[in-house]
Amino acid sequence: MSTNLELPMFTNNSEAELGGRWGMVIDKDLCTGCQACVAACSMENNVPFVGEEDAGYGRSMQWIRIERLWEGLDGDYREVKMTDYQPLMCQQCHNAPCEPVCPVYASVHSMSEDLNLQVYNRCVGTRYCANNCPYQARVFNWRDYADYRETNTADNDPRWSVFQNQLNPDVTVRRRGVMEKCTFCIQRIHQAENQAKAEGREVRDGEFTTACAQACPANAIVFGRIDDPESMVSLAAETSRGSRLHEELRTMPRVTYLAGGA
Amino acid sequence: MTSLAKPLARPHAEEHEDPREHLMHDPLPRGKMNEMVMEAMHETNWKFWVVTGILAVLVATCLGYAWYYLIDKGLGVAGVNMPVFWGIFLVDVVFWIGISHAGTFISAILRVLKVESRRPFTRAAELMTTFGLVQAAISVFMHMGRVWLSYWMAPIPNERMIWPDFHSPLMWDFMAISTYLLCSTMYLFLPLIPDMAMARDRSTGWRKTLYKILGLGFRGTEGEWKNLTTAMNLFAFAIIPVMFSVHTIVSWDFAMASRPGWSSTVFGPYFVIGALHSGMAAVAIVLFLLRSTMKHYKYFIRPEHFDTIGMLMLLVSMAWAYFYFNDYIVPWYGGDVWDKLFQEWAEKGPLWYLWYTMLFCNIVVPWSILWNKKWRRTPWLLASAGILINVGMWLERYIIIPEGLTINRMPFTWRLYIPGVEIALTVGMFALFLLLYMLASRVIPLIPVWEVQEGQEAHLLRKIGKAEIPTLSELE
Amino acid sequence: MSETITFLAMFEDFEPASLGVEKLHDLGLSDDDMNVISGIPIKGAILGRPSAITYVSRIAMVGALLGMAFGLFLIYGIPYLYPLLVGGQPIFPIPQGIIITFEMTMLGLMGFAFIGMFVDSGFPSYTPKEYTPEISDGKIAILFSCPESDQKKFVDALTKAGAESVVPAEARHL
Amino acid sequence: MIKKFFAWLKQPLGLIAVGIVFLALFSAAVYGIYTTQQSPEQPIQFPHKTHVAFGIQCLYCHPGANKGPAAGLPSQTKCWGCHNQIVKTRDSALLAPLKDAVLSGQSIQWVPVAMVPDFVQFNHRAHIAAGKNCEDCHGDLSQMTIYENPQVLNMGWCINCHKQSAGDDQALLTKLTDCGTCHY
Amino acid sequence: MSQQFSRRDFLKLAGLGAATTAVLTGCGPSSRYVKREPYQQMPEYNAIGQSTYYATTCRECAAGCGLILRTFQGRALKVEGNANHPLNLGKTCARGQATLQGLYNPDRVTDPVKRASRGSDSTQPMDWDTAVQTVADALTNYKPNEIAFLMGTAPDHLFDLVTDLANAAGMNAPIRFGALSMFEARATLSKAAESLFGQAGMPSFDLGGADVVVSFGANFLETWLSPVSYTREYARMRRGNPKQRGYFIQFESRMSQTASKADEWIPLRPGTEGLVALALGRLVAEAKGGSLPRAFSGVDPAEVAAAADVSLETLEHVAHMIVSAHTPIAVPGGSALGQSNGQTVAEAVLALNALVENVGKSGGVFLSPLSPNQDAYHQPASAKEMQDFVNQMASGKFKVLFIHGVNPVFELPKSIDFKGALSGVEQVISFATFPDETALEADYVFPDHQGLESWGYQRVVTGTSQQVISGAQPVVTPYFNTRATADVLIAAAQLAGGKFAATLPFKDEVEFLNSKVSALMGEADGSFTAPDPVTFMAYFQQYGGWWNKSDVRVSAGNSNPLNRNIAGIEADFVGSGEYFFLPFVSPSLAETGANKPTLQELPDPTTTVMWNTWIEMNPETAKELGIENDDVVKVVSDTGEVEASVYLYPAIRPDVIAMPFGQGHTAYGQFAAGRGVNPSDLLGAHFNEAGDLAFAGTKVTIQKTGKKRQLSRKEGLIGVYEFRPE
């Protein structure tokens, strides 16, 4: 088994242009903050609910968090302006700071999909990756939230297991002590690639999309192949409004945000 | 045995000072010293058992049950949340590794520098290293989400053909702490062998069988001594870089993260000096406890030792202040906005009092007490200064880790950290440390008698022929 | 020649012990035939004896090399066996290598020093040995064996040199 | 009293007693582990050997294998297709469960044996497309009566085969040793 | 639902998970805990390991979006939008996504039950035959005009069935009502449309084509009328035309989620929206030159500016924007219509549209088309009509009341005492799927299937310019022992015999549907055609409904809205308090979302609060009253009081207090019961001219209670408010 030392993974030439296969463009001008993407993502990826007390203490498990801040809080209430809603999920960085810090290769870079992977069964829960993520895009299973009987009812009421009918078999259900994050709906990526390979063709742009892009009523989220210049997501990313979060950290994220306004 | 020689007159000793006041110049016959140490080990009054009982109960509930509860219910019962993913667990890890560094500092560095006043308490300090590291290891495993899978971090071949990832500072931690734990335990055991032999000769019953086993059949022949002293010297020289590397690696857990307030280049030495700072203070506390509770220890642990420790504490607190100022001024002056925010958050945020207490305990207390020789030599004053310094150092780590995690580059997620079950676990660990220490004092002679005697022999004046020359077997 | 008797001469202090050693040298015993047992480590020179040889440092060096090899394996062997890329860092991490190799070298050094001491001094041996408890009380004992015929000569010489007691040593369980 | 007991233990008779006790415990432990490795009782002792001997293809009873992730199981009507013409079905005790199931409309409770844990997303189609056939993983069915795993289906075994079959095609090797290929 | 262990059950047993399975496989074949069951006969389209997709309609609100449900081995897994459906074009909102939690929910009513006594939890299950017999007896034992039906807002197949039954048998026509229709003031909108189009109907606003949108309180990005289509229109307005970015101005006293997306949020004193609209009309008319229409002549912009607490320059600036725009549009809605002068406001705003001549044009106002099998626009009951209905109930006019798809005990203000009036009705039969407050007061509960388990169709009222009938089919076999209400009514009608049996000669609901749907075969240029009814029904199910391809925009009738004089009056407020009270519909919960935990945990877009009710108060007002974040405060109005925690909301007028509607259930399952408070307790029976509830027309007082209850927020208060980086 020979190891070809010229591959970028050996040479660490981080100047390699963004590259990558899958990317996303989020138009903050269109995003109305309606949380449809958050609900769609939770339904698709078996993300559990955590209850009032834990949600209020910053432990809600949703993979997408819609951020908004305020401007002009000190002035007159008429001049107060809310910044554009900003859906924030894992940015699938090329140089992901969360990957080298994991002691057991649970957070690892997928060279074939050029995505940041979170291997649930390998994670031992040191949570260093979450500390090191500049976007705070990772959430942790503080308790057995996915086993609804265990966490939510005192007497393990069997009726509660009815929720489990809705679990998606393509996505592993995570137990307590495991870190999780947006995977760009990798189960959909793999299924589409599988289908394309069966038919002997490349995955067409727009043939499939992530749960959040599919649900977004304002079509603010566009997902596709960023290495294909004609794809919708590459065209959308061309505009001058496009920018990436914390680019100065050289993480090379795959999500481009289009600023609101004129 | 009445020695024939006169004690070496110290050239620069003040007139009023009685040379006998120094342990090295106040020798007792070895047999007497053996007896005193063995007696101190045997005499256990009811007060000892009461305290051990309380500590055992504390450990069982605060540590035992609380950890089971944490594992069974998941980390949700602790206070950690998003964004403060590491809470008091990591503060404890750094704190206990800090404590453990004092042991190495005393027994290795002072031995290499041949500081004579380290002799009576090298073992007490070395014991602190081992037990401190045990606490650190416990709190590392406590904060892991799925601790029953932490064997995946060990680089052992497995059927999954997947190995741990040595890019991660946590793996360096795993390696460094396990190395340091192993080496300091070995380094604790080496000088213990002669004392075990001595104890073997003087005890009966189960103690005899225990010491016989631990004594390894040591007699004291030249070959054995030569091997032992060579090994100890090797250890003394080798464990010092390991000690420095361990706490640097622990600091790299934070320095390597690209977070505001954490990613700074000065964390390595800053944490090492911080470790020595809290370690020295802890040694002062332990010496005071030993001196005031153990029988005959007033002879072994004398004000001169507190004086040395005090000077070291003053020196190290100055070094710590230097490093803290270094870590503070650079981001304050030109750092990016997030670093400045972290500092503003630590000083003017809702937990501002922690910041001021830290500075008071780490700088004002040592600098105001330890410059005065008389204060330095009063054990209870030094011990209380040590306690305050340790509190200060614990808070310093509380500011770096939980408060450091509150401020990140996404203001939307900033959130206060309210400790949950970690408080019980921390109390449980302090209790475990004391419990281990007290039980060890019943089984192991805490004073390395042969080293003390060796030191005293070296300071005697020998009449060889006409000349009176110091047979400093040790000194050259 | 008639069989020999081993004697244990107890001395209070360095001088009488060094005199005793001289006496034994005069009586023809070479350094290897006698052994000094003491409560604290005594340099050979004080008693006029060559310092004992020890292999601990050599064993430790071997350990250090082994540790270094293990450290290098951890850094360069593991990614070679199962290359997994993380965070844009090179797959063979040079700087981390230094840290891990240093740690493992130190572990090897100290581990093997410890083992070396065990091996070299023949620990742990619980067989009966010539020993008296007073040694650990600070006395210095010289263990030598001399032909049975002139044992009296040896005993007188040593008592004159200041030996507290010269008594035939019999191996006892420690 | 304890001393006397220890003393008795030291002499040869005592040693033999200790040996016996140790052996008993050890064998109990070995048996315990052995039972966990046994796959449980199947409702029908289905002999793969005889069916393969008749020349029935694997995909006939497990049609999903080249179409999707799960290979699937034959429905009872498929079994009954042949078995109702075989005289043995009526009277042989072994085939009674099939007869009862089909007549009563209940379904047979097969126990899956080649199971991978839930965090592994195994896909039959990709393996068959890559040219592997059933024997490579499931062993030689022509010799096997009730199906048993020829080896433990653990990750090491899978990765080994992935690496060998990728050979020196670098892109395929990256894909096949990529965590995201199987774990998501 | 076979009780066999499937692979998914394995997770239930093995504690869901990654680690246990690893441990299990580690120590032995995990197969011991899993059985795998082949189908007796392989059901069609159910290949092994493949998902099958079914098209249906979303029942979470009355909009009627088309959904595609992914199902796998008999379980519904994921909701996706139906790309062909003209209303939502493949998109869904958060509540559409969470509809699955309504299907798989531990609190559903599982069997037909007879309640021991009204209001008590103890029920004893019945079997369906006795249930159908009870309904049949209810139909026959009483005179037809003593039987009343109360149904949800959505005009669906059940409404058609009951209407046919009622007309034939002489029963009272079914009334449709819902909290959403109350808060959207649908009656006011349809009456105001009459003034513009000459015929009653639901106006539809083509925001996508407009380049300047001036909205008066319309929360069209939240839950207004058809949120998914209006969000799509909003996106088209912003980025539809690359060269021209739409400009959006919102007049609202509180910055709602919609106002937060506006380029200009202009807070004005509640109740003065009508005045501002007229003032703008006048300014625009003057700027355009020409005669000043009578509608806008009776108002003076300077006075209006003072009354509405808005600077005159702002009004002139907005007027200028309207004049310089190619296709401006004005949208009335939300709290603007929830005033005593709601209809005047609506007419004024529609007149503004008439002034800029955008009626019926692209980017303008038009009347939503009626669907083919519908003769006139049937408007859901306004709050006033509900009050008359309640008075009739109290007076004992009705002996039997059937309730389906609505929860009036919770949704109606307490002052219209629906619960009290129930005592006047002898027999109350509820078809609720969840044990909500109204089902608690019913004598019988014969649970209907959840939306995803039932047949049917639903007319799309507004949100698209095409005639749409959205079809529905069960995507999974019913999970509990429930039965479709249409089946129950048909069966009961057969049992009752006579006129009842004659009108519903069908074997079951599907046959009834076939008759209704096949009536569409004759319609011109439908989205699909089929030779025979069976294939037509199959296509209807497969495409998720029928719609005509052409754009049917009903534009201006004969009435000229501009020369009617519109009284420029301020709204009058009820209640002695000093703060205006503004209840708004919670964007993530609306009226039926409280029983779904995923919706409860969705952060509210503007305040990011989850799981509870909060009171929005301006930080300055709070400072005067000495109130901080999370202080529990009592809000008192003339008709009631509620207690909730305060959220210091910076973008709200100091004299306005706002509260979300959606929580405060006393029953409706464990996720909703006892959580939060219901603002409708504070609302009095105060209506506007069109009969809709003047829900924004109440004034309240604030009393501190000294208690403190932490709100669970998604945001960290530190970074967003207290210690924020400038």
Image (cartoon, coloured by chain):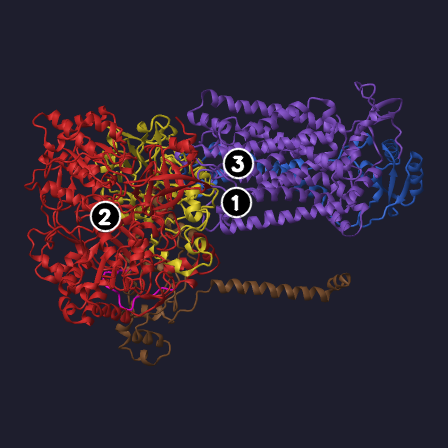
Chain colours: A yellow, B purple, C blue, D brown, E red
Query: What's the magenta region?
Result: E35-49
Task: Give the amino acid at mark 2.
Answer: Ser
Q: Position of residue E315 (x, y in %)?
A: 21, 27
Secondary structure of the residue carrying numbered label 1: loop
Q: Which quadrant does the N terminus of chain D fall into?
A: bottom right
Closer to the camera, E173 or E594? E173
Reply above or below: B121 against A46.
above
Q: Position of residue B126 (x, y in %)?
A: 67, 37
Closer to the camera, B221 or B333? B333
Task: Give the amino acid at mark 3.
Answer: Ile
Task: Give the amino acid at mark 1.
Answer: Ala
Q: Are marks 3 and 2 on the same chain?
A: no
Q: Are marks 1 and 3 on the same chain?
A: no
| Pointer 2 residue | E181
Q: Please tell me in which quadrant of the rendered image residue A30 appears.
A: top left
Q: How far, Cα to Cα, is label 1 from label 3?
A: 13 Å
User: Which label lies toward us, 3 or 2?
Assistant: 2
**Mark 2 chain:** E
Q: Please tell me in which quadrant of the rendered image residue E139 appears.
A: bottom left
User: Which label lies toward us, 1 or 2?
Assistant: 2
Reply above or below: E665 against B475.
below
